[in-house]
Image: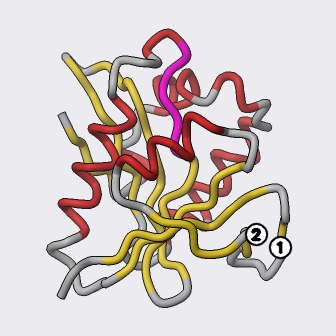
Amino acid sequence: MLKLIYSMGDLDVEQLLKIYEEWDLDEENYLDFLRNDFFRQKDAFFAVWALQGQYKAALRVEPYSDGLLIAALSTAPGERRNGYGYLLVMEVLKHLSTLSYKVVYSHIDKKNHPSIQLHKKCGFQFFTDYAKYLDGTVTYNSFTMNYLYKK
């Protein structure tokens, strides 16, 4: 089931960090980023796929360019290949269709073939062969894909 989280106080930090346990996060800095930067942005939220109160997959949604950016998509290590990432992305896209945005972007590591395939299955297409982040930095290790809402 899709759960939208708009504030740090509503986020189950312990469950979220389990989803990202393989990411080599500096947990304290990441939580500070969420608290002090991410949740202060207009239209920014976490989306999680939860079953019986347990987080299975998560992603962030935040303002980006002329649309929104899906970032940090991940499924808990023991829950992969159960379709939770796909269900999460599709439900988030359905939710975002109710907003005024017309395009959703996602940056995907070029070596992350399962994520690339998931994005294609969800209707994303290749946009650029690099990723440009909000702070202006660019990496050529990732693609940018986009999802366009039909008018």
Q: Is residue 23 magenta?
A: no
Q: Is residue 76 above or below residue 124?
A: above
The magenta span reads: 73-77
Q: Is residue 78 left or right of residue 25?
A: left
In percent of the image, x 42 and y 67: which residue is there?
44
Q: What amino acid type is highlighted by mark number 1?
A: Val
- Tell me how many marks there are: 2
Q: Which secondary structure dominates the residues rendered in magenta? A: strand
CA gap, disc 1 to disc 2? 7 Å
Q: Which residue is mark 1?
A: 138
Q: Is residue 74 magenta?
A: yes
Coordinates of residue 146 in the picture (x, y in percent): 48, 70
Q: Is residue 15 above or below residue 28?
A: above
Q: Tags 1 and 2 in contact by the CB under 8 Å rule? A: yes
In percent of the image, x 62 and y 60: which residue is there?
107
Of mark 1 and mark 2, the one earlier in the sequence is 2
Nearer the observer, 68 or 27: 68
Nearer the observer, 46 or 71: 71
Coordinates of residue 101 in the picture (x, y in percent): 31, 83
Q: Secondary structure at mark 2?
A: loop
Nearer the observer, 127 or 99: 127
Q: Is residue 139 left or right of residue 41?
A: right
Coordinates of residue 84 in the picture (x, y in percent): 33, 29
In percent of the image, x 31 and y 41: which residue is there?
88
Q: Quadrant of residue 86?
A: top left
Q: Secondary structure at mark 1?
A: strand
Check the picture and name the quadrant holding the N terminus.
top left
Coordinates of residue 138 in the picture (x, y in percent): 83, 73
Q: Residues within 10 Å of mark 1 (few under 14, many from 20)?
A: few
Q: Which residue is mark 2?
A: 130
